[in-house]
Amino acid sequence: MRKFTGISTKKIIAIAAVFALLGVITFTGSFSPSALISGMLPTRIASPDAALSLPQSHKPDFALDFDQQGYNQCAGYAAAFIRRYYGQEVYGSDVYDQISYNLPVDIGVPPHKLLRHFRQHNLNATARLGELEHLKHYASRDIPLIVLVGEGISWQHYMVFLGYDREKDELYFYDSEVGAIDRFRQAPGNRTLTEKQFLDIWKNSLPGFSQLFITVEPVYNPDLS
């Protein structure tokens, strides 16, 4: 999701209201009785353990395409990036068509639609609320993360968290609004933020979405172990 440029204030408020309602639906599971059973509620993780041992840095060594999204299609492109990471060849525009709402006004994609999409493609996805150290913990285990950042009703946006470097105070992302990587770039991903820069937008001022992230892992099959 990107900034709602070129849309009237009245429409922005309406879109935000709908998106907020979808957020409540996501977090309460009230959109259907089966949603609660299927695990659509976000998991709030306890404060990071002081003894949690993390490496000083984690820089992924995989090479994936950093495709650039169309208007408001970040959810589809973030999901497609992670599916490609797990060997599923798919395009962001196709995923967006599958998960977006067929409405006259594009309202974006709430988290429960992403969870359902991953689960339909043999991947375990969980919405979580946590701290930056949790993101680093999952990334250091090579578990892809989608983070939701934004500024209240002004804009909302999904990115993929890839890694970090504590000494340099750098966090690495795939941001589908940025698109293809600069050939001179040395850091992982196609976007780098300091911790402060990231926290300012991850502490989303849209109620219910503050410090939300989605972990995605393969479905465990004991027959293959």
Image (tube, rainbow, N blue to C red):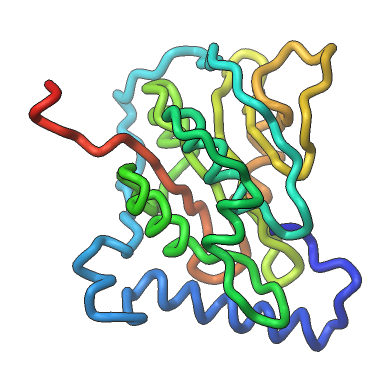
Residue 99 image position (x, y, % from top left): 53, 62
Classify residue 200 as left or right of residue 33: right
Residue depicted at x 44% and y 28%: 87
Residue depicted at x 54% and y 16%: 62
The quadrant of the rendering that contains the N terminus is bottom right
Q: In terms of depth relative to the viewer, which is nearer, 45 or 108?
A: 108
Residue 173 image position (x, y, % from top left): 64, 32
Residue 201 image position (x, y, % from top left): 67, 51
Classify residue 60 as left or right of residue 197: left
Residue depicted at x 58% and y 73%: 101
Is residue 97 placed above or below 195 in the rendered structure?
below
Classify residue 187 as left or right of residue 185: left
Q: In terms of depth relative to the viewer, which is nearer, 158 or 82?
A: 82
The answer to which image quadrant residue 138 occupies is top left
Q: Can you name the residue that lies furthest to the right here?
A: 6
Classify residue 187 as left or right of residue 35: right
Is residue 2 placed above or below 141 in the rendered structure?
below
The answer to which image quadrant residue 8 occupies is bottom right
Is residue 136 placed above or below 100 in the rendered structure?
above
Q: Can you name the residue that lies furthest to the left here?
A: 223
Badge count: 0
Residue 92 image position (x, y, % from top left): 62, 46
The quadrant of the rendering that contains the C terminus is top left
Residue depicted at x 33% and y 51%: 119
